[in-house]
Structure formats: structure tokens, C-alpha cells
């Protein structure tokens, strides 16, 4: 086991012992972190299959250094590689080596060299087990990826307790970004691109959609989030999209700007004449659930009445969107007075909009409606 300080080069005796066993050799950069020596190497993706990784799945949790592999995550990550072979990005794997090793510095170098690891050494992944499993699966379909590389950070012979602490520390500060900012920065997602383009081109929505947060603070000056608007746009153009981004954006923008004319409060928020929080607290129409419900009803409206949909859309203003109207909204958009975002509640809210627009319900919507009315009578 290496000392906590930067260790001296192995003794002659240690080197001789290492020379007597088969070893793996990795070009590495040597560093020190928290007074512990570690190494950074580049592994070809093919090495993911060639190097034996210790499998802990059969051990009880307290004896493992890692959570068990969630196999349901692997296809999603693997497909990410296969779908984006020219621009996928992976961060480094973090691996512990349960063995003595030997670092051989290059001439005149003390940080660049070769790390020799016994063939029987155990490699334990502290961070990146799902990436490794996905890479192995992707290689089955795209063998030509075998020569690409991924960085690997090696920590040495540090024992189960330290490995478990490393896992806890590596995940302690890992905060998943909000869905809105994920969509904002995602240039592969066609539906995200559509929603962003609609917002940026629309005078009615540009100032009232928060592009970064997925939940709005009480004092936020915005009415909707990008994630909510993305869901609504996706539902609106379902079965109507042509695949031409600008054409589809014009369709969606035309619809949403027509909707906005029937909700004067949105314009008042945009103009700074009324606080957004006041509108959200007072009306259902200023929440993501209503946006998505209107989109679903709008999809049916555009399909069934492509020529006079704007005239029919005016009926949406006849709905009493007041949050205080518990007779209408409790159990639909509200549960215990609080806005609910569940798929069932979106459907029930959509049903109200469809009824106002004199649109028939789909079989699944009819089923949800009957269940709701049965509960209401009970």
C-alpha cells in the first residue's frame, strides 16, 4: 500500500517482485490529491472489455464500493453513443486498483511515465459503471469505436471504507441540472429546438417564459418555464409537424399568439403592469398544466378545423379560469387546492378546454372523464 504522501520510487526488491509477475502497462500522468498519489490514463474503448472489472453485484450493500448496476439505464446511454458517433461526450471514469503498482517515469520526468499493474489486480469502478456498460454494448454494434478513448483516473489500494467514501463524495455534490436548462442547451432535440424558436420569435411569450428554471419562485416575473412550454409545443404539433423547423415553428407560434389574445393578463405581466405571481395565484391558465391542456385541445382543433380554428378558439375565453372556482378545477387541475402536474390531471384539464371548444373527447380522455365523474358523485 502506498503512503499518504507522494511515495518514493519502488525499491529494487519491489521492482524485482513486480518483474516476476505478468503486468498491464498504461501510459499515465502522475498527480497528488489530498496527499494521495493518483494517475490519469487514456483507455481505448476496447480496453473496457479487455480489462477485468471486479463485479460486486452479489455482495451485500455494506460490502460493496458501488451501487448495483441499473441495467435499464444502459440502452439509453448506449443509444446516445450510437446516435451521436461524431460528437458524443463522456467524462472520466474513476477506478480504484486493489494492488501494488509500479510507476516508471520517463527520462527526465517525474510526472509522466508508465504504470505497471499486476494482471491479477482488481479494478473497482467508483464512478462510471453505467458508462462502461453502455460502451461495451455500443461496441457490439459499432466495433469501429474500439480505438476511441476515454480518460480514466486511478486511485491506489485504498480499501473498502475509502472506496465507499469516494463513491459518497463523488455523488454528494452531483446536482442534476434543471430540465429547462437541459432543453435550452440541447441542440439535438428537435422538439426542444422548436419550443426555443417559437419563444424567441414570439413577442407574446419571449418575456414571460423562464428559459433556465423548471419551477418558478414565488416572486418570479415569468409565467411559464421552458420545460412546460416544450411539453405543450410537442403536444400541439403531434401529427401536424412537417419536419421543417421554421414551418413548424410558424404554425406553433401562430397558435400560441392567438391563444395569448384571449388571456389579457399575460400581456399585462409582459408589460409589467401586474405581477406574475398575482396571476399565477389567481388563475389556472397561467400554469404549465393549462398550457399543455390547451396544446392538446389545440392539436385536435387544428386537425378538425384547419380553416376556421382561430374563430373557434375564441370560445376558450368563456372558461372560468379562476383558481377559486373549486367546483370546476378541484380534482382536475387542483388537488387539495394545489396545482397538480400528473398526466391524469392534464387530461382532465384538457377535457374542460375541449368541451368549451366543442371538440369530441378521444376514447382515453372519455375513460378518464368517466372515472373522474364517478369519483365526484361518490
Image: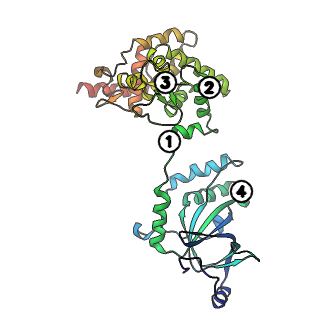
Q: Please, what secondary structure does the residue beneath circle 3 have?
A: helix
Classify mark 2: helix, strand or loop.
Answer: loop
Q: Is residue 177 above or below residue 365?
A: below
Q: What numbered label is drawn on residue 241? A: 2
Q: Is residue 255 left or right of residue 20?
A: left
Residue 68 in view, yes or no? no
Query: CA gap, disc 4 to disc 2?
Result: 34 Å
Q: Label 4 belongs to which residue?
A: 145
Tell me if residue 344 comes above or below residue 285 in the rendering: below
Which mark is drawn over residue 191?
A: none
Q: Earlier in the sequence, mark 3 or mark 4?
A: 4
Residue neighbourhood size for the residue with mark 2, other residues' Cα within 10 Å, grouped as few (<14), some (14–19), many (≥20): some
Give the image quarter of residue 24. bottom right
- Quote the CA–CA distance across marks 3 and 2: 14 Å
Say if mark 3 contacts mark 4, CB within 8 Å.
Answer: no
- On the rendered structure, is 117 left or right of 61? right
Q: Report the front residue among 369 and 18.
A: 18
Q: Earlier in the sequence, mark 4 or mark 2?
A: 4
Q: Earlier in the sequence, mark 3 or mark 2?
A: 2
Quick one: SS at disc 4? helix
Whether tag 4 and tag 2 are in contact, CB under 8 A, the answer is no
Instruction: Pinpoint residue 182: horizontal percent, then vertical percent.
Output: 55, 41
Which residue corresponds to mark 1? 178
**Where residue 337 appears, x then y in whole percent?**
30, 29
Mark 2 or mark 1, earlier in chain: 1
Identify the coloring.
Answer: rainbow
Mark 4 neighbour class, 10 Å CA radius: few under 14, some 14 to 19, many 20 or more: some
Quadrant of the drawing holding the C terminus: top left
Tally of marks: 4
Report the mark closest to the observer, 3 or 1: 1
Q: Which image quadrant: the N terminus?
A: bottom right
Examine the rendering and report whether any part of residue 181 can be seen. Answer: yes
Amino acid at each position: 500500500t502506498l503512503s499518504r504522501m507522494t511515495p518514493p520510487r519502488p525499491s529494487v526488491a519491489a521492482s524485482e517482485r513486480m518483474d516476476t509477475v505478468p503486468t498491464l502497462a498504461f501510459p499515465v500522468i502522475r498527480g497528488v490529491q489530498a496527499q494521495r498519489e493518483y494517475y490519469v490514463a487514456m483507455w481505448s474503448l476496447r480496453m473496457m472489455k479487455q480489462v477485468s472489472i471486479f463485479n460486486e453485484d452479489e455482495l451485500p450493500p455494506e460490502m460493496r464500493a458501488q451501487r448495483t448496476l441499473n441495467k435499464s439505464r444502459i440502452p439509453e446511454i448506449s443509444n446516445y453513443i450510437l446516435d451521436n458517433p461524431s460528437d458524443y461526450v463522456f467524462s472520466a471514469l474513476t477506478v480504484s486498483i486493489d494492488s501494488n503498482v509500479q510507476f516508471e517515469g520517463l527520462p527526465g520526468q517525474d510526472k509522466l511515465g508508465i504504470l505497471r499493474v499486476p494482471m491479477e489486480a482488481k479494478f473497482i469502478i467508483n464512478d462510471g459503471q453505467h458508462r462502461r456498460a453502455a460502451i461495451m454494448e455500443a461496441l457490439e454494434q459499432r466495433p469501429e469505436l474500439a480505438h476511441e478513448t476515454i480518460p480514466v483516473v486511478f486511485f491506489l489500494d485504498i480499501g473498502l471504507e475509502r472506496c465507499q467514501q469516494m463513491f459518497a463524495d463523488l455523488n454528494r455534490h452531483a446536482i442534476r441540472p434543471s430540465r429547462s436548462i437541459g432543453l435550452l442547451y440541447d441542440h439535438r432535440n428537435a422538439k426542444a429546438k422548436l419550443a426555443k424558436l417559437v419563444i424567441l420569435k414570439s413577442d407574446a411569450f419571449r418575456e414571460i417564459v423562464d428559459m433556465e428554471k423548471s419551477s418558478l419562485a414565488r416572486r418570479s416575473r415569468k409565467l411559464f418555464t421552458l420545460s412546460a412550454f416544450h411539453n405543450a409545443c410537442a403536444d400541439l404539433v403531434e401529427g401536424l409537424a412537417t419536419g421543417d423547423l421554421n414551418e413548424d415553428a410558424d404554425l406553433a407560434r401562430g397558435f400560441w399568439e392567438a391563444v395569448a389574445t384571449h388571456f389579457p393578463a399575460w400581456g399585462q405581466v409582459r408589460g409589467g403592469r401586474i405581477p406574475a405571481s398575482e396571476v399565477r395565484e389567481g388563475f389556472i391558465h397561467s400554469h404549465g398544466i393549462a398550457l399543455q391542456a390547451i396544446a392538446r385541445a389545440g392539436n385536435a382543433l387544428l386537425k378538425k378545423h384547419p380553416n376556421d380554428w382561430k374563430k373557434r378558439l375564441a370560445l376558450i375565453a368563456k372558461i372560468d379560469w379562476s383558481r377559486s372556482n373549486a367546483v370546476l378545477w378541484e380534482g382536475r387541475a387542483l388537488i387539495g387546492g394545489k396545482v397538480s402536474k400528473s398526466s391524469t390531471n392534464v387530461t382532465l384539464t384538457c377535457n374542460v378546454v375541449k368541451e368549451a371548444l366543442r371538440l369530441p373527447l378521444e376514447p382515453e380522455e372519455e375513460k378518464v372523464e368517466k372515472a373522474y365523474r364517478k369519483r365526484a358523485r361518490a
